Image: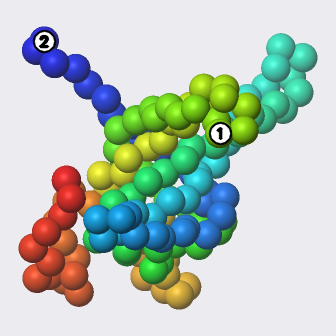
Amino acid sequence: MAGGLNKVMIIGNLGRDPEMRLTPSGQSVTNFSVAVTRSWKNPEGESQEETEWFAIDAWGRLGEVANQYLAKGKKVYVEGRLRTRSWDDSNSGEKKYRTSVIATDIQFLEPRGGQGGGDAFGSGPVPEHDQGIDEMPF
């Protein structure tokens, strides 16, 4: 295989409200966290639970839509790729790392406003109310 594969698919609940900001070049990026909980029974038959947290970065129009419609606690499907960045901590000089999911598709798994089904945004078809958007950052 020429090249590789870097693909992540998660379903979980938002741990906090999305936060949108503009980069110095003027591009929007929205950050939020998603908690994915796994449940199982141990050999003694007791219920066990483990939660993994994912940092999500959604760029451009995808992030703007996520910022507008998502909120803490909402169930969401996120598809994307992993990216790890590193920097030197200014206080300790220690090397720090942050791994995040760069979202390419987001599907809202709960209805907005308590009616209808979930919505999907990203690399799939553009919803009717967003037609005319001619630029996606993917």
The disc, 1 or 2, on the residue closer to the chain's N-terminal end is 2
Query: Image height check: is 90 above or below 131?
Result: above
Question: Which residue occupies 55% across, 59% down?
Answer: 32
Question: Which residue occupies 88% across, 27% down?
Answer: 46
Which residue in the protein does label 1 denote? 90
Q: Quadrant of the N terminus?
A: top left
Figure coloring: rainbow
Residue 37 in percent (x, y) is at: 67, 42
User: Which of the pair 99/107 is nearer the observer?
Assistant: 99
Which residue in the protein does label 2 denote? 1
What crowding class fits label 2: few (fewer than 14 Cα within 10 Å), some (14-19), or many (20 or more)? few
Residue 98 in percent (x, y) is at: 55, 36
Residue 95 in percent (x, y) is at: 60, 26
Q: CA distance from mark 1 to mark 2?
A: 41 Å
Q: Is residue 19 at all visible to an observer of this figure?
A: yes
Determine which quarter of the picture holds residue 42: top right
Question: Which residue occupies 26% across, 25% down?
Answer: 5
Q: Is residue 121 at all visible to an observer of this figure?
A: no
Q: Kindly report which numbered mark, 1 or 2, lies closer to the viewer in this rendering.
A: 1
Query: Image height check: is 103 above or below 7?
Result: below
Query: Image height check: is 131 above or below 42?
Result: below
User: Which of the pair 127/61 is nearer the observer?
Assistant: 61
Q: Are marks 1 and 2 in contact (CB under 8 Å)?
A: no
Element type at mark 2 = loop
What crowding class fits label 1: few (fewer than 14 Cα within 10 Å), some (14-19), or many (20 or more)? few
Question: Which residue occupies 33% across, 34% down?
Answer: 7
How many discs mark residues in the rendered view?
A: 2
Using the image, tell me which numbered label, if any, was put on residue 132: none
